[in-house]
Amino acid sequence: MKTYKPTTPSSRQRTTVDYSTLSPVEPWKPLLKSLKKHSGRNNQGRITVRHQGGGHKKLYRLVDFKQRKLDIPAKIETIEYDPYRTCFIARIVYQDGERSYILAPSNLKKGDTVIFSENAPLREGNRLLLKNIPIGYFVHNVELQSGKGGQLIRSAGTSAQVIAQVPSQGDDGYTHLKLPSGEIRMVNWKGMASLGMLSNPEHNLVNLGKAGTSRHLGIRPTVRGSAMNPRDHPYGGGEGRAQRGTKRPKTKWGKITGGRKTRKKKKWSSKMIIKRRK
């Protein structure tokens, strides 16, 4: 982490990720795309998600989550920052000259070689079938359905641990993964996963230090419910610092937030969860 001399009140607490390990290059133009900003508004122009808007201009990097170019070695050209995600990304070039972006594991360096194959070597950054990964290994960018692309374990510093390989009828079977939340989940072992833990593990230690940094990220101010009037919030009104006045925590619209389970009881994927998170 990078700290700052307290030349201003905001810089006293401020901490940022040290980006000196990243490659000093511009992003690869053919893999960039401009996304329209909506600032939390729907097609009628009404705000449906509060506290969004403004922020620095940014371009979306077309990250390859499927990585289905099998059995062709690829070399790491650069490790880059991605404004749309918390982990870093790596630009790779295959032996046939094609380039793409992938999520960068923590120990991947410029010049390393990776390969995506059903039986790839057990080396960080390589991608292979879940059923071919031994128990105890850590994985990221995990597919829930074969060929759909990675959907699990994509944020900074995260990884899931393979704790069991359970065959079922015929060639089918399930891999048991322990997720960062503590949940133990079955995933079809015909899906693919990349080996290793994702980069930027210090992301959770970042202290923005001042409101302006939050505005650069496109986050607008949040007003406390207790500071509002009674017509605007269930916590509003009262002389001085008033108590909450309701039995349980509520949103601005009176919906219960604290302790109410939101997962549907008959959700189809519940049978895939062996142990719920704590």
Image (cartoon, rainbow, N blue to C red):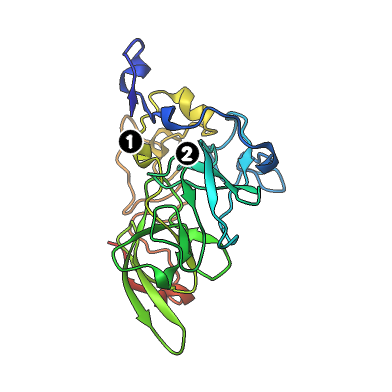
Q: Is residue 157 visible?
A: yes
Which label belongs to residue 110?
2
Q: Residue 20 appears at what percent x and percent y?
A: 42, 27
Residue furthest bottom in the image? 169
Label 1: how many Cα within 10 Å (few below 14, some 14–19, many 20+): few
Residue for badge 1: 205
Residue 138 on image: x %, y %: 34, 58
- Name the residue: 45% across, 43% down: 87
C-beta proximity under 8 Å, tags 1 and 2: no
Q: Position of residue 205 (x, y in %)?
A: 33, 35
The quadrant of the picture occupied by the N terminus is top left
The amino acid beneath tag 1 is Leu
Residue positioned 45% across, 36% down in the render = 229
- Report the mark closest to the observer, 1 or 2: 2
Quadrant of the image occupied by residue 16: top left
Quarter holding residue 208: top left
Q: Residue farthest to the top?
A: 7
CA gap, disc 1 and disc 2: 25 Å
Q: Secondary structure at mark 1?
A: helix
Mark 2: which secondary structure? loop
Up-down relation of residue 169 to residue 130 (above or below): below
Which one is in front, 41 or 123? Answer: 123
- The local crowd at label 2, few if under 14, some if 14 to 19, many if 20 or more residues have their Cα within 10 Å, is some
Q: Is residue 260 left or right of residue 150?
A: left
Residue farthest to the right, as pictured = 44
The vertical placement of 101 against 255, above or below, is above
Q: Is residue 231 in sight in this rendering?
A: no
Residue at image position (41%, 33%) is 227
